[in-house]
Image (tube, helix red, strand yellow):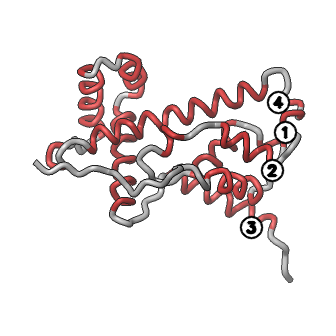
Amino acid sequence: MNKQDIKLPTTVDTHANTVDTLLSYLHDCHFDETHLTPMHLTLALEYAYQPHPTFWRDFSVSLVEDAMSRHMPNWQARPAMMDGGADRLFHELDKVVRINAFDEANAEMLSALPVAERPTTPSAAFTWITAELERKGLTEDLEFARPDGDRCGEKALDVLYCLEEAKRGGVVERTSTIVAKAYRDAVMKRHAPQTT
């Protein structure tokens, strides 16, 4: 049997450039206090995403906090961030990271299968993932997967595809990364100097 791992060359720190990438995105998108929302900051996360097997599992929202502090040194003093606003914001970002980390872990499990034995449809992937989680006794992960149904399988297959393409030297961007880049490009175009 031929296993195909999704291991990429590892670096000392998967996130060595993540803060700089986040900071660049915040700057390019002219982030201010009105952008301190889970939606806007999730776009920044997606922009910073790199197809590395443990990108999300190694990610800490403290990287976002660091970038925000560099871009807007007084962001915590903003009215929306007081009285628990910052905690709520980071709680929402933690959920986004957890979902992505879960999809990444499921993709890793799928990658351990011989290519010929891997599920190829979202439904089959979901069935295999839930059976594997149950077999391993990962009750919390199993409960996390069940409400999403086929979406769980679909996302795992998407992540697996992106990682395997990256391993081969190809580039496949996640839909959410494409959206984040399009948003950045639109903001930059809107703020570009007008020439007549």
Mark-to-mark CA distance, 1 and 4: 7 Å
> Percent position (x, y) of residue 139?
36, 16
> As displayed, is residue 73 above or below residue 139?
below
Mark-to-mark CA distance, 4 and 3: 29 Å
> Few, some or many C-alpha atoms within 10 Å of disc 1 (few <14, some 14-19, many ≥20)?
some
> Percent position (x, y) of residue 158?
38, 47
To which residue does mark 2 refer? Answer: 71
Q: Secondary structure at mark 1?
A: helix
* Dot 4 or dot 3, earlier in sequence: 4
To which residue does mark 1 refer? Answer: 75
Q: Secondary structure at mark 2?
A: helix
Quadrant of res 9: bottom left
Q: Secondary structure at mark 3?
A: helix
Query: Mark 2 near mark 4, Cβ–Cβ under 8 Å?
Result: no
Q: Residue at x 85, y 26 (%)?
A: 82
> Few, some or many C-alpha atoms within 10 Å of disc 4 (few <14, some 14-19, many ≥20)?
some
Task: Assign the C terminus to one quadrant of the image.
Answer: bottom right
Inspect the image, locate mark 3, and give the three-letter code of the amino acid beneath it.
Answer: Lys
> Percent position (x, y) of residue 45?
61, 46
Residue pushed farthest left? 1
To which residue does mark 3 refer? Answer: 189
Q: Could you say which disc has been placed on residue 81 in the image?
A: 4
Inspect the image, locate mark 1, and give the three-letter code of the amino acid beneath it.
Answer: Trp
Mark-to-mark CA distance, 3 and 2: 20 Å
Of marks 3 and 2, the one in the foreground: 2
